Image (cartoon, coloured by chain):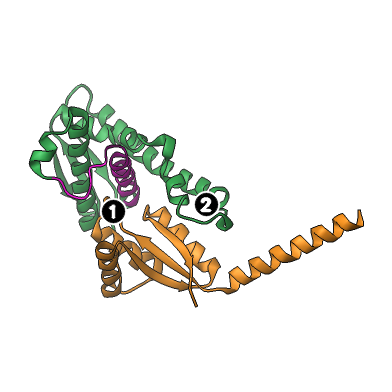
Amino acid sequence: MNTLYETSATTLTEEETRTSTELASRWNVLVFDDPVNLMEYVTKVLQKVFAYPREQAEELMMTVHTAGKALVWTGAREPAELYVQQLHGFQLQASLEKTSS
Amino acid sequence: MKIVPTLEGGLRIEIETATDWLVLEQIAPDALKMEQENLPSRLSALMDEASEWDEMVVPELSDLFHEQLCCVREIVQEARKGSGDSSLGHLSISQEDGDRWYGALNQARIALEGYYRFGPSQEVEEVESFPAPKRSAFIRSQFYSALQSVLLEHVIE
């Protein structure tokens, strides 16, 4: 019994450490190109979700269009997830990636 | 069909033929064409397991997307009912419903693209060589896209 408790406690601690490390890391929010979403729509969504000025949103949209994807925001995991959730709500293809630094 | 912006910031669609009704009635069925591989799940596939997207986000997105389709289906049904047996009629898209219409049309286009794989651009000859169901789906998708552009220009802020 004792051994079992110790093993569970160790696993829990490892998970907690991993989770807190992931939360402390910086995360990129990526938007991917797709053949459906209109360029004007992608621009408007980036303005709505991130409150970017029109010029910045347009520039990011063009990067999505020409390079296939664009890094649209970097920061903590929790807000990054909220941004991706909003982007998915607007039916844009978006995901998260841990920064390399 | 004629699409006219209204003074209230919405759109009025004038229905002129029976085909116009058929196209508008096809938005929701088209959006559900890929039900086995629905949009929230496909978006979720972009996320890692740690995000628990399937449990935390997919149900919410499913409700949102379902609500968009219900809104469009109801407006078209009501307008059709109001026109009686005539193929003429009209329906209104209010400014508040603009986002729902856009979302429903987008779902339809995403599903049609996923099902038929039209690709980013099509030559006329290529479209003419499509089998009939794919060709008519392509034309509907083009119409949905045009209506989305009008919504972006006149309704969605």
A7 sits to left or right of B133: right
Alpha carbon separation for disc pair 1 and 2: 21 Å
B66 falls in the magenta region: no
Residue at the disc numbered 1? A37
What residue sits 47% from the left and 44% below the top? Answer: B62
Question: Type of residue at label 2?
Answer: Val
Looking at the rendered image, the quarter that the N terminus of chain B falls into is top left
- Residue B31's place in the image compared with A3, above or below, is above
Picture coordinates of residue A65, whole percent (x, y): 26, 62
Letter of the chain in green: B
Task: Check disc 2 and report its element: helix, strand or loop.
Answer: loop
- Tag 1, which chain? A
A59 sits to left or right of B55: left
**Which of these two is toward me, B19 or B90?**
B19
Letter of the chain in orange: A
Identify the mark at residue B57; answer none if there is no mark. Answer: 2
